[in-house]
Amino acid sequence: MKPKLGIASDHGGFALKEFLRKSLEESFEVVDYGTKSEASVDYPTIIGDACRKVLAGEVPRLIALCGTGIGASIAANRIPGIRAALCHDEFTAEMSRRHNNANVIVLGGRVLGTDLALRIVQKWIDTDFEGGRHERRLGLVEEQKP
Ligand code: RB5
């Protein structure tokens, strides 16, 4: 059985989402939470709903996209339990797993080329959380108050 992976975007990330979904489908059961076309949609709704699927245990991790990745990461990180990392390179993708245990990776569909985006995602998928002192720090993140 293939491992599950969620993916979601607004219209700004749609083209890159489609490329990533097709590229990853050979190795993963990719659950596509939309959007399904280039028609304009609101990123907080679509990304927020997909993040709640992660928290519900429907998928262990989510790839989220919008045009820049900024709106999607802001929206995702408002949801307690979501650790969303906006990544433009392989190093930050790797560190977002090793140190931050990011359960959502966010990409800018209007920022990244397809090959680079796939390499970033692959690095994020392949890297494990280190735990230890980083677990304590993530606990402190959870304790942050408004
Ligand atoms: C949509 O035009 C665009 O604003 C959105 O995809 C994203 O880049 C927001 O941060």
Image (spheres, rainbow, N blue to C red):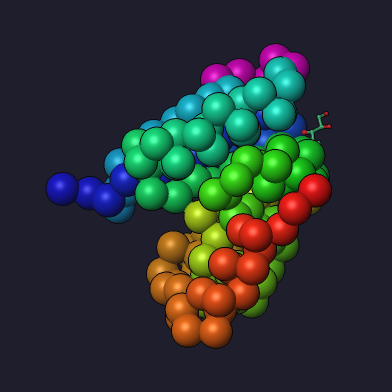
Q: Is residue 130 above or below residue 87?
A: below
Q: Which residues are magenta?
A: 36-40
At x 55%, y 61%, the residue is 102
At x 15%, y 48%, the residue is 1
| x, y percent for residue 34 | 53, 25
| x, y percent for residue 41 | 71, 18
Q: Indicate whether residue 39 is drawn in magenta.
A: yes
Total labels drawn: 0
Quarter-of-image position of residue 48: top right
At x 22%, y 49%, the residue is 2
Quarter-of-image position of residue 32: top left
Q: Is residue 132 above or below residue 29?
A: below
| x, y percent for residue 70 | 79, 46
Q: Is residue 28 above or below residue 138?
A: above
Q: Is residue 26 left or right of residue 141?
A: left
- Res. 132 in view: yes
At x 54%, y 49%, the residue is 81
Q: Nearer the viewer, residue 75 or 8?
A: 75
Residue reaching furthest to the left: 1
Q: Indicate whether residue 60 is drawn in magenta.
A: no
Q: Is residue 35 left or right of residue 108?
A: left
Q: Is residue 57 above or below residue 14?
A: below
Quarter-of-image position of residue 56: top left
Which secondary structure type mostly characterizes the magenta part of the structure?
loop
Quadrant containing ligand 1:
top right
